Amino acid sequence: MADVTTQKPTSLQDLARAQTSAPTATKILAENVDFYYSAFHALKTINIVIPDRQVTALIGPSGCGKSTFLRTLNRMNDLIDGTRLTGKITLDGEDLYDKRVDVVDLRKRVGMVFQKPNPFPMSIYDNIAYGPRIHGLTNRKKLNEIVERTLRGSALWEEVKDKLKASAFALSGGQQQRLCIARTLAVEPEVILMDEPCSALDPNSTFRIEQLMEDLKKDYTIVIVTHNMQQAARVSQRTGFFLRGEMKEFGDTDQIFTSPKQKDTEDYVSGKFG
Amino acid sequence: MADRAPTVPLTTAPLPTVPLPAQSVSKSTSKPSSIPPASSLARFGDKIYGAVIFLASLSIFGIILWLFWQLTGASLPSIRHFGLSFVTGSEWDEVSSSYHVLPYIFGTLFSSAIALLLAVPVSIGAAIFLSELAPRWIRTPATFLIELLAAIPSVVYGLWGIFILIPFMKQFIVTPIVGSRLPHLPIIGELFKGQSAGYSMLAAGMILAIMVTPFITAVTRDILRAIPRSQREGSYALGATKWETISQVVIPYAKSGIIGAVILGLGRALGETMAVTMLIGNQPPNTPNGISLSVFQPGYTLASALANKFSEASPGLSTSALVEVGLVLFGVTIVVNGAARLLVFYTAKDVQGGK
Amino acid sequence: MSTTLSSPPNLLAKSTGNVAGRKLKNIVMLTLCIIAAGLAILVLGLVLYFLLSKGFSSLHIRLFTQLPDNIDTSKGGMAQSIFGTLVLLGVSSAIGLPFGILGGIYQIEARGRFASLVRFFTDVLNGIPSIVIGIFAYAAVVFPLAQRTHGQGFSAYAGGFALGILMIPTVMRTTEEILRLVPFPLREASLGLGATRWRTMWSVVLPAARGGIITGVMLALARIAGETAPLLFTIFGNQLFATHKVAGVSVPTLTAPIDALPLRIYNYSQDVDPNHNAQAWAGAVVLITLILVLSIAARFATRGNMQEEK
C-alpha cells in the first residue's frame, strides 16, 4: 500500500485507492479544503475520501480541527459569521459549496448528531416527527410508523413506547442522545455526522450507542468525531488523525492503531499526548 | 475560623462566640503577632452591618404596606359611601358628589388592548430580526436606538403625540376612514363611529404602542438570545429552513418568556399616565354610560382621570374617591405584574431544566 | 430502508413541490420580520427626528439663564425648572440610594426563601405605576405637611420622597445584579483571611463592583429625571427659584413648591401659546440630553470597571 499522507495526490483515483484497502464506493470526497474563522486558519489542505456505508472516525487532540471539518460536511459552519472555505467537497460527486445548492436539501441528506443531546422542548413523539413534518409529511399513520421504526432503530423503543407523549427532557442523557439519533434517522439521511456523541454519556449509554452505530452502518454512511481512541478502534473501519488543522494520517483503522506511519500518529494513539 | 487562632494573643478580650481550645491559645502566646486581633468591636460591627442591610431590604415591604395603608385609609370615606358600585357605575359628577369609575377601567383596558394589538406583532417581528436575522452592523445601532427610545420620558412622547401624531392621524387615518363606508358596516363599524378631534382612544393606544414596543422588543430579544445554540443547530441539521427553526423550535422554547414580556408591557401600558393623559381627550365619549367601543371617541383611563381631576378635586369625598381610583389602579397593576413575574420565574426554571 | 420522504435526486436539481413551498414561506415570513423591524425603527426614528428638529430650532441660551417671562412669552426661559429638577434628583438620591444599595447588598449576603421573597416584592414595587406612588406621596407627605405648617404642603421634600421611592427598587436590583458578578472566590478569599463580613464587603466586594454600582445609580437617576406623574401631586410648580438665604448664601428651599423640567414641559404642551409650545420642545431636548448624559456616563462607569477586571 502506498504512503498515506497529506501530500497532494496525483489523481483522485490514486487518493481513493491509497486510502482504501477494500474496494467500496466513495460517498464524500474532500479535496484541498482550507477553512478560516475570520483570520484563524482552522483547516489546512484537507484531502479525504469517505467511503459509503462504513464508519469513518476522526481523532485528534482538542482544537485540532476535526469537529470543524465534520461541520463543513453539512455546511453547519455557514451559521457562524465570518467563516470561509476554499477547496472542494463533493457528495456523490456533487459540489456541496456550489452556489446553487440549498443547505436545506443538503442537510436533509447529511444529518448530524451533536456532542450534547439537544432534544427540542416537546414530546418524544414530536421530537421525531419534527423532521418528517417540516419535510411535508402529515399522514398520521406514516408518522406513527416512522416514530416506531426510528425508535427501534436507535434501540430506544422498548424504553419509551408507553410514554411517547412525555417531554423529551424527562429522559436520561443517554436516552436523549438516542432520541436525537432517532430524530436524525427520521428524515432518512444518507450520511450521519456524529460530533463526539458519547462525550456527555456514561459508559453504559456509550456502549449502547456504539452498538447502534454497528447496526446503522448497513444503511448509512457514518462519520464520527471522537476523543476516545478505544471508541474509534471499536466502531470505525477508517480513521483520520488530525493535528493542528492538518490531517496527518488517514487509513484503515487497524493500520492506524497498530502500525501508524507517522511519528505524531504513533505518539497520539499510544497516549503520549492528547 | 481555626486559621485565626495563632494570631490571637491572650491579652485581648475573650471571644464570646468562638471558644478556642486552650492548647492553641497557649501556643500563640509564644509568638506575639503584629496583626491586630479580630476584636469584639469588629464582631459587633458585623452584627450592625447585618441588621442595617436587613432593615434596608425590609423597606420594600414597609413601602408596599405603607402605600397600601395610606391609600386605603384615604379612600375609606369613598369606599364606605359607594361600596362596590364604585367600580360598576358610570357617573362621575362633582356637583352631585357621585363618583364611579367603570368608564375609566374600560378606557384603561381598551387603550392597552389597542396598544398591545399594534405593538406585539411588530415587537416580536423586530426581536426575531435583531436576534436571528440581522447582520452585526445593523444589530448594534438598532439595539442602541431601541434602548435609547426606552429611556425617553413619557411626557416627551406625549408632546410628540400632540404635535406630530395627532395631526398625522387626523389627516391620514381618521378623515379617510370616517369618509369611507367602514363606519356604516355592521359590528366593525362600531369601532369607527363618530367624529374625532384627534384626541381619542386610538391616539392613546398608538402612543402606548410606540412606548411599549422598545420594551417588549428588548426583553424578547434577550430571551431569544438566551436560547441555546444547540437547539437551532439541531433543527438546521434536520434540514429545516430558518423560518421553520424560528417558528417551531425557537419560539416554542421562548414562549412563556415572551408571554411574560408582553404582560410586563401590558403592566406598563395600564399604568402609563402622562402620554395617555395628553392624548386621550379626557372627556367622556358621547354615550349614555360613558363607554364607547369606537376608537375615534375620547375617553379616560384610571391614570389619566387621576392626573386630570386632581387639581379640581375639593377636599372630602371628591379627593377620597380620587385616591380610590389610585387604589384600583394599584390593585390592577399588582395582579398583572405579579402574574408576569411568576410566569417569567417559572419559565426560567423550565429553561434550566431543558439544557 | 423504506422511503416515505423523497430526497431530490441530486443537490443541484430545482426544488419542487413541498420544498419550493417551504422555501417560499421561509422568504415570506422572514421578510415580514424584516418589515416589522423596519416599521419599528421607522416610527422610533420619526420620534427622534421631530424631537431633534423641533427641539433644536427653539433651543436658546435664555432657556438656561432666565425665568419665564409672562409679559412677552417669546423671551422667557426655564432656568427654575432645570434648577428644580437638579434639586429633586439630589433629594431623591438622599432617600433612595441608601435603601437601594444596602438592600441590594442584603440580597447577595442573604440566601434562601426570604431573600427571594424580597426580590419578588422589589419587582412588584418596580411595577407600580409612578402616578400611584405620586398619590401615595400626596397622602403621606403633602397632606400632613399642609396640616402642620398651614401651607400647601407641596414641596421638594414631597417630590423627592416620591422619586426616591421610585428609585429604591431599581437601585436595589441593579446593585444586586452587579455585586453578583463579583466572583465568589474573591469573597471567600477575604473571609478565609479572617476578615469580617462587612470588612469583606467594604474593602473587597464594593471596590470591585464600584463601577457597576455607579452605573445602577446613574440609570436610576436617568429613569426618574423624566418622571412627571408623581410631580403633579407633590411639587405644584413654581415660576421662581425656590431658594432662601442661610447666612447670606442662597440655598434651595425644600419646603416650598418647586418647579421641574418634565412638569414644565407638560404645562407648556397644554398651553395655547405657540411660544410656550416651542419652549416645551426645547425643554424636551434638554431633558433628554440630561437623561442621555446620565445613561452614557453609566455605560462608561461599567466599561472602566470591566477593564480593571481584565
Image (spheres, coloured by chain):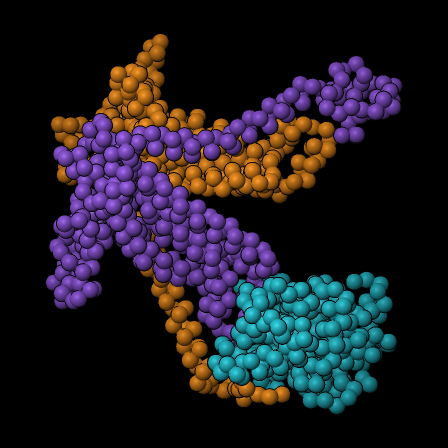
Name the quadrant containing residue B322: top left
Q: Residue furthest top?
A: C247
Number of marks in the rendered image: 0
Residue C241: x %, y % from top left? 27, 22
Nearest to the observer: residue C240 or residue A182: A182
Q: Is residue B66 visible?
A: yes
Chain B tint in image: purple
State the residue at coordinates (17%, 66%). Answer: B186
Residue A231: x %, y % from top left? 78, 71
Q: Quadrant of the C terminus of chain A?
A: bottom right
Residue B346: x %, y % from top left? 52, 52
Up-down relation of residue A14 to residue B17 (above or below): below
State the residue at coordinates (48%, 30%). Answer: B59
Q: Quadrant of the N terminus of chain A?
A: bottom right
Up-down relation of residue A98 to residue B192 (above or below): below
Nearest to the observer: residue B217 or residue C261: B217
Up-down relation of residue C6 to residue B59 (above or below): below
Q: Is residue C307 visible?
A: no
Nearest to the observer: residue C188 or residue A39: C188
Nearest to the observer: residue C22 or residue B312: B312
Question: C40 left or right of B219?
Answer: left
State the residue at coordinates (44%, 85%). Answer: C17
Question: B353 left or right of A246?
Answer: left
Name the quadrant containing residue A61: bottom right
Q: Which chain is orange?
A: C
Residue C273: x %, y % from top left? 14, 37
Q: Which chain is cyan?
A: A
State the residue at coordinates (69%, 36%). Answer: C188
